[in-house]
Structure formats: C-alpha cells, structure tokens
Image: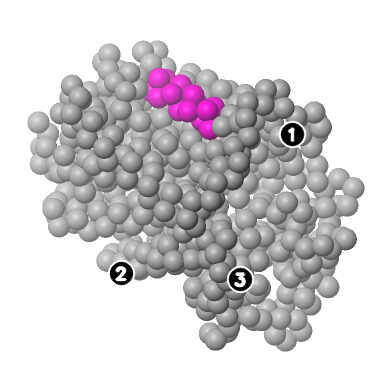
Amino acid sequence: MTRPEEPLSSSSSAAAGTQMVESLGLFSATTLVVGSMIGSGIFIVDCDIARLTDSPALFLAAWIVTGTMTLICALSYGELAAMMPKAGGQYVYLRESLGSLWGFLYGWTLFLVIQTGTIAAVCVAFGKFLGVFFPAISSTHWLWHIAHVPAIPVGPMVLGNMDIGVNTANLAGIAVVAFVASVNIRGVQFGAGLQNVFTVAKALALAGLILLGFSIGRSGAALAANFGADWSQFWRNAGWHSLHPVQVGVQGPIALVGSIMVLAIAQVGSLFSCDAWNNVTFAAGEIKKPRRNVPMSLALGVGFVVITYFLASTAYMMVLPLHGDAHGATVFARGIQYAAEDRIGAAVLQQIFPHFGGYLMAAAIMVSTFGCANGMTLAGARVYYAMAQDGLFFQSVGKLHPRFRTPATGLVVQAMWTTILCVSGSYSQLLDYIIFAALVFYILTIMGLFVLRVKQPDAPRPYKAIGYPFLPVLYIVMASGICAALLRYKPQYTWPGLILVLLGVPVYVLWSRKSVRPVRRAGWQ
C-alpha cells in the first residue's frame, strides 16, 4: 500500500527486479517533444488548409488556433505530469482520474492507430523521399503485390482503395521501423542520443527553410497576391459573413459555412501536424527530476514548434501565392493550394532553387521523418509497458530487458504491428481517424485534471496548470467545438475513429477478466 498522497507507479514492481533508469535530462526530454511533433505534416498539410480556407488571413489563423490549443493543453498536462511522473503518461492520467477503462481505451487506440499508424506513415514517407535520390525505391515498384482492395462506399465513408504487399518504398520504411526499434531496445540513452541528433538537424532544416522564404525566396508577386499594398488581399474571404464551400463527407453535398466553422474544419491538418507532443509523458519514468523537467520540456518543446510552424507557413506565403490554378504550368501558377502532390515545402524550395530544391526538401523530410519515427517508437512502448503492469496487455510486455532496462518486448510488438500496417497500406486511412480520436482523449484528460483537483485536493502538485480553471475550460470548449464540426461536416474523419475506440470496450472486459493481476481502479491506493 502506498501513502494516500502518493501516486501509483506503473514501474514500481517491474519484472525481474529491474527498474527504469532516470537518465534523460531536460534537453533530451525537450528534443523528444520537438522530434515527435515535427514529421512530414508541416511540409504537406498547408495545401489542404489553403484550399479549405481560401483566405490568407484564415490560412494563418488556422495555425494560431492550433498553436493556442496545443500550448494550453500541454501546459495543463504539465500539472498531471508533475503529479504522476511515471511510465505511461497519459494512460496513467486517464486511469487515475476517470478509471481503468478510459486508460485502456486510450492505450488500445494508441497501439492500434495513433502511435503505430503515425510511425508507419512517417517511415513510408521516408522511403518515398529516399526514392528522389534512388529512383528504384518507389511505391509503384512492387516486390510482392498481394492484392488491391477496391474502394467500398460505407455511408459517408469510403473504405478500402489500398494495395497490400511489399514495394521498395514501404520496404525502406519497414527497415527504418526495425532499425529504430533495435536502437531503442539497447537503452533509452541510445534512443535519446539518436533523437537529439535528428531533432537538432530537423530544427536547423526548418529554420533554413524559413530564412530562405523571408530572404532570397521573397517574391513581390506573391506578397502582392497574398497581402496587397493595403492588406486588402490578406483579409479576402475572411469576413464574418463570408461563406466557404465544404463538401460533407466523401461524396456528400456542398455546404456553405462561415469563417469560424471553416477554421474548425481546417484543424484536421494543423492539429495532426502538432500532435505527439504528449509522447514525453510516456517516458517520464526515465527522465531526471521528472516533476520539474517533464512540464518544462512540454512548455519549451511545444512553444518552439508552434512558433516554427507559424513562421514556416508565413514563409510559404512569402514565396508563393495562396490561390492557384490546379492545372498551372509552373510552381508559382499552382500556388500553395495546388502544389504538386500537396508537397508545399518541396514547391517552395523548387521555386527558390529550380534545379536542386526538390533534393534539398527530400533530404530535409527524410531527416524529419526518421527523427519522428525514433521519438514515437521510444515513447510508445512505455505505454504498453504500463498497461501490461496493470494486467491489460500481454504479460511479457510488462517486463524490462534484464541488461538494458528497456521495454524490449513492447518495442518488438509495436514494430511488428507497425510493419503490418506498412504492408497493408491501411495506415494512410488510419491517419484520417487519428485527430478526432486524439482530441476526444485530450478532452477527457483535461476533464480528469478537474476530477483530480476535487478527488485529491491535497495531492502534491509541484507545478499547477497555468490559467486554471479558465484556460483548461477554454481548451475543452474549443476542442469540443472542433469535434462537433467534424462530426457534422467531415464524418469520414470521425465515426471510424469512434468505432475503433469503442471496439476496445469488449476487449477491455475480456482482458480484465482473464488478467492474473487485479486491474487498477481510479484513485490512489
């Protein structure tokens, strides 16, 4: 039994008498936040945001909304991280505030979709951009084509439309999955060292892109199109009474929505790009002085990324016009809205350096996706370890490697499922469901902050959420509004995610019944 004021420890009874080692400092914790957040999204999603908003002001406003929400959420999580600096992070917060079922549903969704789907996507993206340098590596160069699953309309959704098998691009991605898993098995310091190197490299690459956009890439024609001499172009289509066409579902009717609603719908891309900041909480059991360093790394890392993303999107507008022609013959004519294959980062560098810009961006994205895959691989296995400690995942996953003191089995299981997603091609559709499911769990976790303030008013809180209760309430309101907008206008992003979450309920019931360990309930014991 622990004292009433002590939080439960997911690692206090680690198998074989081993304990996770607190070996990561503030810098490594911060690079884990930054490295997990920055993948390939910032180089791609701006095109869809530009098409949806059709306004320079709303285009940048989408990033301001995302940055504000993400920062509020991260600062609120800091209180929970300081209270419960244990392996498992958000899984533990949900378990202790709302109950073990909610913790399990989060871990279930994380394993099934959120973590593994994102790792699969960024690893395959690595392979595709490696093909820029080695043309034999391509998603169309099949080594073993098993089957093509045709598109199947299901209500507002379209399922299928994917190829199953091994091509040279996803084979390269699978190699990355295996490599980063093996590195992280050998010790958290190995994985963190790799993370530090690649996070610094990707931060420098993004900084270089921003500087190029604001300096030699700056185009008078783009500035005139996006801002205008009197800023009239900047505010175009951004008025309170402006209407924006949005297609409901995949094949539904076109609805006209106001500026606030279109901003909410546009959050799918920007929030996806800013996600995974919470991964540092998963590895809290291996961070030095976690009650101080985890909240601080959240504030520093998230703050750095949201500012960088805003500056990168602004830099894009310095080089290319927001509005473009889908059939334009040049990069400039296609604009941000219709950059080739939505690769806006590549389009910007190609505009600046016509002969080798594409190679520069391919190298930058390879660095970015590799670092993202490594950070998410390191962190994700700690959640499954905490679940296994509670009897809610395979028992072997709850054991640490006797020599390296890492959740080696969890890393292997995560890599195996990620590989299956790579081969199946399903990760691309799963990514569509991530943001809605993630938002639901973020809302629940922030609600848990209020629950714990009531249930455990005297629990030690070395750090308290800034702006409590107003900022956490603001986040819940904003996130709930976005969820409602997506349910109404983008059901293809919502209902599949909800179904995946709810499928975990019977799994929880079965697993908790057969568990040889008592499933922990909410509250301190």
Q: Is residue 207 above or below residue 86?
A: below
How many angstroms separate mark 2 from mark 1 (CA)?
51 Å
Q: Return the x and y of residue 274 as percentages of the image width and height.
A: 52, 53
Picture disc at residue 470: 2
* Quarter of the image where the N terminus is located: top left
Residue 274 in the figure: left or right of residue 496: right
How many angstroms separate mark 1 from mark 3 (CA)?
33 Å
Main secondary structure found in the magenta portion: helix
Please name the residue shown 20% across and 44% down the image. Answer: 99
Identity, as a three-letter code, of the amino acid under mark 2: Phe
Of 259 and 163, which appears nearest the observer?
Answer: 163
Which numbered disc flags the more N-terminal residue, 1 or 3?
3
Picture disc at residue 140: 1
Please name the residue shown 32% across and 45% down the image. Answer: 502
Q: Nearer the viewer, mark 3 or mark 2?
A: 3
How many angstroms separate mark 3 from mark 2 (CA)?
29 Å
Q: Secondary structure at mark 2?
A: helix
Picture disc at residue 53: 3
Identity, as a three-letter code, of the amino acid under mark 1: Thr
Residue 147 in magenta stretch: no
* Quarter of the image where the C terminus is located: top left
* Residue 454 at least partly seen: yes
Please name the residue shown 63% across and 26% down the image. Answer: 146
Q: As drawn, which residue projects farthest toward the right?
A: 355
Q: Return the x and y of residue 327 as percentages of the image width and height.
A: 82, 62
Q: Is residue 505 above or below residue 314?
A: above
Identity, as a three-letter code, of the amino acid under mark 3: Thr
Q: Secondary structure at mark 1?
A: loop
Residue 420 in magenta stretch: yes
- Does the residue at mark 1 contact the one at mark 3 (Cβ under 8 Å)? no
User: Over which residues does the magenta segment extend?
Assistant: 406-421
